[in-house]
Amino acid sequence: MVLKIKNAILHILRNDGPPSVFSEAELDVDSEMCEAFISKHVKKLINNPAVRTANFASDADMYKWICAYQDGEKFFKETSLSIAEKLDTIMKKYTAIPPCDMLVTRVGHNSGEYFAVLLLNYQEVYAHKSQGSENQLKTCVALPFATGKVAFAALIGLEGSALPISLTEKPVTIDGNSVLYFSELFLNCETSPSKKEQAVLISEVTTEFVDEFFKNDPKVSAKIKTAMVEEAESEDGFISMDNVAGRAFEDTETKAQYISTLRDAGIQEDLPLGERVVKQQFATHKIKAENGVEIRFPAELAAIEEDLEITTHPDGTVSVLFKNLRIVQ
């Protein structure tokens, strides 16, 4: 993915004594160090299947500021300052929110133009200190490494007036309550489940469905998983649960019951989960026994009797027989 960093600025937000420092100059985006650091973190945000999608509330301050930036009424540095000051005010009111550096950047890549806000929480690292010929260890705070993930970040699309958001965040305990301050207090937006969360929910509901209607038959579970993967492969990651049910079940009644169960759980019938997410969640099937034995195998094998035979006995126990195996290691 080619990523072009067009603007970037770094503000230091403090609520632990020292004053916040709002930068009056943008970062040198042409420097190799700056380009490498920003690119790696923004690309991880773009490629993270755990990001949630969201939309600004109509009266959200950030929505107004970015619209003004789009229309040329506000410059990049001025817009970033408004954003940083808003979070600074929230942090001083709720001191449980840790101090951080705020990186604001505008980037472009093959899918469009984006405005990104990343909170770089500090982490403790070890370093050495030397006094003459004596070397000792010391600790100091640093920004997240380029190899790590930023816990609080938003990627805002600049194409059109909707300004769609992709974000990642974690709850923070404020006054004894678990609060998603980043989306609720700062961005003022309404979030939807991430692709990963939706896939996990489908898996959980499917497990309950198979347990209730098929006495936890591993063949049925594996067949549904295989149908999910086949649907993702044939439709470029787009999932129609109606098609999945048609692939997994032959009789119309069972198919309808499965779709109804998904609908009752709040799962949409058409989902752009992406092939990567679907394969991570459904390509492998696991059988776990009471005695601690675990068996993992590609879900598609369950439909090939020449390779795998799963027998459920009247007493509820299961026998698994793998056939025609060629040991490679």
Image (cartoon, rainbow, N blue to C red):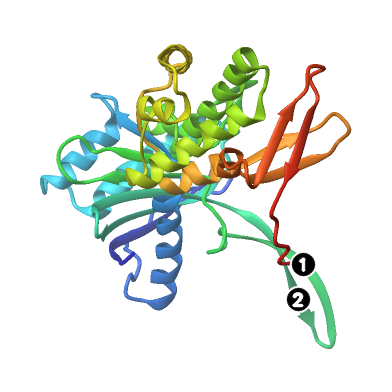
Mark 2, Cα crowd under 10 Å, few <14 / some 14-19 / many 20+, is few
**Image quadrant of residue 320?**
top right
Q: Quadrant of the N terminus?
A: bottom left
Q: Residue at x 65, y 18 (%)?
A: 211
Residue type for callout 1:
Lys
Q: Residue at x 54, y 53 (%)?
A: 149
Q: Residue at x 38, y 48 (%)?
A: 117
In percent of width and height, residue 173 lies at 62, 28
**Image quadrant of residue 148?**
bottom right
Confirm or deny contact between disc 2 and disc 1 (CB under 8 A): yes
In percent of width and height, residue 285 lies at 63, 39
Position of residue 24 in the picture relative to residue 329 (left or right): left
Residue marked by disc 2:
129
Q: Which mark is residue 138?
A: 1
Position of residue 139 in the picture relative to residue 225 (left or right): right
Q: Nearer the viewer, residue 161 or 295?
A: 295
Q: Residue furthest bottom?
A: 133
